[in-house]
Image: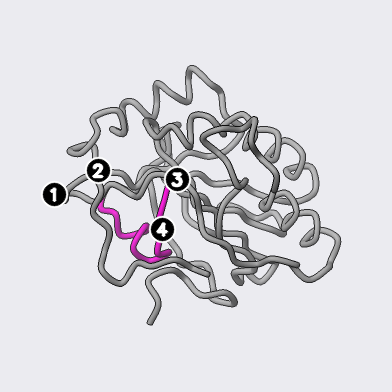
Amino acid sequence: MSFTLPLGSKAPDFSLLATDGKHYSLQDFDRPYLVVFFTCNHCPYVINSDELTRKTVETFQKQGVSFVGINSNSPNTYEEDSYENMIKRMEEHQFPWTYLHDATQDVAKAYGALRTPHFFVFDQERKLVYTSRGVDSPREPEKITSFDLEQALEELVAGKPITTPLTNPVGCNVKWDGMDPHWMPVEACDLV
């Protein structure tokens, strides 16, 4: 079995605390399409691409797409990734997505999150149709040549097949509790 959720899989459910103090699960996101993405507070790949993600969210929310950011990073590895700092970051930036805290890292394991950011796109039946990066150069936006997430969403809402449903996410690895900051599970591997 692969580490990362295979294409065609149903979205694993969750019940996670958000920065607004409420708990959310899959059924709370009832728009036709859903993007679940693993993110955090400290990663330069996330920080430098957050405004691109904001534009994507603002464009596609109007077309029936819900967006859920999940921080699974251990605050024992990076204090910046604590729940308290998630709240501060949302207050400062007012991101247009729900920001959830995966304190046990169980949701990251269920989805097979490899990096921050790592995007998972689900269709109306909550089946995985795209998993990968948002763009090909999230740390250096001036070097972007491919807007993979936007292309996948454009095709999805238009009822077309996803041209490139699988690429490798680009970013920092998920920070697993009790492990070296660069550690990844042995079964984690490139997607393509």
Badge 1, how many Cα within 10 Å: few under 14, some, many 20+? few
At x 70%, y 33%, the residue is: 55
Marks 1/2 in contact by CB < 8 Å: the verdict is yes
Measured from the top left, where is residue 51 in percent x and y? 62, 29
Q: Residue furthest front?
A: 143
* Left or right relative to 19: residue 153: right
At x 72%, y 35%, the residue is: 58
The numbered mark, 4 or 2, whose residue comes first in the sequence reads 2
- Magenta-highlighted residues: 104-116
Amino acid type, mark 4 = Ala
Marks 1/4 in contact by CB < 8 Å: the verdict is no
User: Label 1 vs label 4: CA separation?
Assistant: 17 Å
Amino acid type, mark 2 = Ser
Residue designated by label 2 = 74
Measured from the top left, where is residue 65 in percent x and y? 70, 51
In front: label 4 or label 3: 3
Q: In the displayed structure, would residue 159 be above or below residue 117? A: below
Residue designated by label 3 = 171
Residue designated by label 4 = 113
The numbered mark, 3 or 1, whose residue comes first in the sequence reads 3
- Which mark identifies residue 178? 1
Q: In the displayed structure, would residue 67 be above or below residue 93? A: below
Q: Mark 2: which secondary structure?
A: loop
Measured from the top left, where is residue 84 in percent x and y? 31, 27
